[in-house]
Amino acid sequence: MNNVLKKAAGALAIPVIVAVVLNVLCALGGRAMLASKTSFDNFVVYTAIVMITTMALSINLNSGRFDFSLGAMAVLSAVIGAKLSYVLLAGGPGSATLMLVLTVLAGAVLGLCSGGLYVLLRIPPIITSLGVTLIYEGITYTITGGRYMMTEVQNADMAAFAGNWYWGLLIIVAVLAGIIVLFDHTRFGVDYRALKEGQRVSVNTGIREVPNALGCYAVCGALMGIVGFLNAARNTNINGGSLSFGSIGIMFTAFLPMFIGGYISRWCNEKIGYLLAALCMSMLNSTFAVYANQVNASMQSIINAVLLVLFLIYLNNEYRIASFFKGPRAQRKAAQG
Amino acid sequence: MRKSIKKALAMLAASALTLTMLAGCGSTASAPAASSPASTPASAPAEAGQDEPAAPSGDPVKIGVLVADVSGEEALGFRSYYENYIASNYNVQLLYTDQLEDAAGERAAIEKFAAQGAQAIISFSSSDRAMQIETCADNELYYAVASGMLDDAQYEQYKSNPWFVGQVGPSMDTEFEAGKAMGEYFKQKGATKIAMYGAFIPNPMHVYRAAGVLVGLGATYGGASDKDAIVGQIFGDQGIDVSKVTADGVELVAYFQGFGDTTTDELNAAIQAAPDAFLSVGMATTFFTQQLNTAGIEFSDIDSFTSGNAEAMANGKLVYLAGKYSSSVGPIFAAVLDAVNGNAIRDAEGNALSVSQSYLVATDSATFDKYFTADKGDSPIFSKDVLDTVIGADVSYDDFVALVEADRS
């Protein structure tokens, strides 16, 4: 029982500290962090976007496969889902649900293609993913003519989705449960973790690396499909004009929460860690909204980057910092290794 | 390993050089096409030998269209009119650019159109209009500004350029007045907390509109209350600095501009500030209608009378629209066709056309529909019958001005 409480306290420490600090900051500005239902709707959808992007990024990155094409996958799958759902329902009732399903399917196929290329070419995934990014961005540009896609995603159904927090929450719960089950309680997940820890040994024990890698890419693609859908619902458009790696920004939103989530996972399941990290990022985003007149978009990017650097500095010097507070003996121990 | 990398790099460099050479050859080969229009405007009529509008048969007149906006309601309305109505009623081929984002893109597009044999350029893009005119003149292309105007100094500089056909659109004073009327409307309505979208400031048209909104709201900017001083400061700030806005009884609670990755967050911040009204100087109806409707915030825009905006006014929270007809870009097309046919319309001093178009304002669905239905599909306000009255050899400057300025509401 004591252990459970200790773990819960450890896992919740960062989110609670962030919530307290940011709420105090907002109060100093005379405003509430979440002042209205609209703010809360945005908060939940943004949390879902960050959490799912972080999961998609971490799945391959933890296995040493850096995938630049996540953003391009999100955009292209959303374009395909939006186009098809508009053809079938013309923006009528059920459009949002249909688009979500089609976008996830399209994302899975795109992920599979990306993984297939990696497996086929056997060149470093970072190189493959750069090529895939350019190809997917090019296809998106060709389909949209470089325009913002609006008609297909601006309808009452999409508005209802983005305007009700419980849809976002439902997606968070479903994705979290699905990913935990898939990666922690299935043969696929066990193989994934074995390959992550020791690829050569795992392959020698009979684990098939290629199907597992393809499965990971397909899951990442499906997750980015959900992100593409959520972005389309939140922005009420899809930017079809991203070329020359313009879509990479979608992926970079996940770096800071990935490191924070990884840190929190010392006390809980890694995926829960990503959710808590996403909550922190969403609170930061809502605080930026409160101070939007004072802290402009470029300043916000700088603050995010500084936070990332500071957190990485902390992670790399954690034991030194801890020993500094514990006294000279502990410092000597830390210095010895 | 190193050897193979060296080989690969050598191959890459060789391929790049070969491609560059081929590209260079391509430019040279297509260069003569640029000289297909008459070598000087003065000799154009004689060479063209056409006193009547372009015949519906034969080689079409090629006109390049520069666009900076490929998604907005207004831009799509203009494009639809050109592509669906003008192209089917006149023997013209309209060549559109992709979204142009800077002066370099505009120059490249003009040079590309020249290589494709275009005879004229109609510009909806305003990154560097002076450069556009000079590039058109270098490539012997007629040039016209649609739905906008050069600033006064630029017009003075280029009005006698024979390749500059003219400009038809709201003048900067008209833009300022449109913004001012919008600000006054909401102030009289009792709005006290205002959120504002500055569209694409420092685009001059948006700067003047934004200055007008501030004046209309009764605000000062950096202590100034007159048009020129406010405009100058907004140009200097490249946007509106909320801390410099002071107004009795009205508070600017949120301001943002541009459109990109951070726009949704900025819009959400504006909505979170719970404004009484969201005032936009352009493009809000394209970008934000759904979010503002969902949030229940009344909004306004300077755009055009399109089906999307009709829906937003009838069933959404759009309560004020200052707009243009989609076919309001018809007269400048007619002027360009005249120039290509050797009948360029000039004023008494031989200068390029410069005619200001004003905005129509709708604050309810009935008024909106009156303007909207008058300018639809196959029966636009500037129809072929109307435009033909200013296409030909005997059209005077006054005829053209009368056509543009006639009240068609």
Image (spheres, coloured by chain):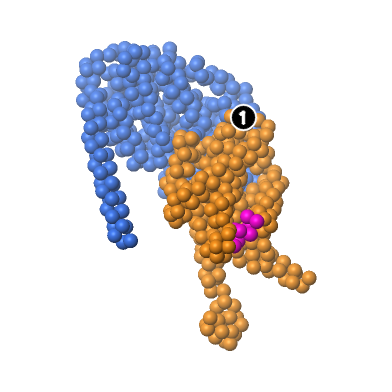
Q: Vertically, is A136 above or below A314? A: above
Residue A23 figure quarter: bottom right
| Main SS class of the magenta portion in the image | helix
Any magenta on residue B136?
no
Mark 1 Cα-neighbour bin, 10 Å: few <14, some 14–19, many ≥20: few
Residue B406 in view, yes or no? no
Type of amino acid at the residue the image marks with label 1 = Leu
Residue A267 figure quarter: bottom right
> Going 59% across and 27% down the picture, which residue do you hit?
B310
**Image location (x, y in percent) of residue B196:** 55, 43
Which color is chain B depicted in?
Answer: blue
The secondary element bearing badge 1 is classed as helix
Q: Nearer the viewer, residue A159 or B266?
A: A159
Q: Nearer the viewer, residue B316 or A87?
A: A87
Residue A147 in view, yes or no? yes
Q: Which residues are magenta?
A: A187-194
- Chain shown orange: that is A
Query: Residue under mark 1: which chain is it in?
Result: A
